Image: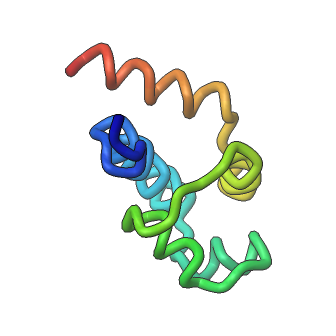
Amino acid sequence: MSKSVFTERYNRFRQLLIKARQASKLTQAELSTKLSRPQSYVSKYERGERRLDLIEFLEIVEALQVEPETFIKKLLEEKEEN
């Protein structure tokens, strides 16, 4: 089994996070400030250089004001479409 960071599902996960940030009209720097993290933190997970754990994911969607259930449902729906 390959590392999930290199799977198509993880790539869709990253793309949805990027779209959610952009829909919130936040730059990486602005989001990183809300998360009390360096800008490189956001950049690395968006590029797939860093994997997120569940707690980090929840912190990010909270900062983006996105319901985690809605985000996950969208991720699952996109899987079914492919």
Specify the quadrant of the image occupied by residue 1.
top left
Q: Position of residue 73 (x, y in %)?
A: 52, 22
Which of 79/52 is in front?
Answer: 52
The colour mode here is rainbow
Q: Position of residue 34 (x, y in %)?
A: 75, 72
Residue depicted at x 76% and y 48%: 55
Residue depicted at x 56% and y 58%: 24
| Quadrant for the C terminus in the image | top left
In the drawing, does residue 7 fall left or right of residue 26?
A: left
| Residue 9 vertical position relative to residue 81 in the rendered view, above or below | below
Specify the quadrant of the image occupied by residue 2.
top left
Residue depicted at x 33% and y 47%: 11
Residue sitting at the far front: 1
Specify the quadrant of the image occupied by residue 8.
top left
How many numbered circles are shown? 0
| Residue 16 vertical position relative to residue 46 in the rendered view, above or below | above
Q: Position of residue 23 (x, y in %)?
A: 48, 54
Residue depicted at x 42% and y 69%: 49
Which of 68/23 is in front?
Answer: 68
Residue sitting at the far left: 82
Q: Position of residue 41 (x, y in %)?
A: 59, 76
Which of 59/48 is in front?
Answer: 48
| Residue 76 vertical position relative to residue 29 in the rendered view, above or below | above
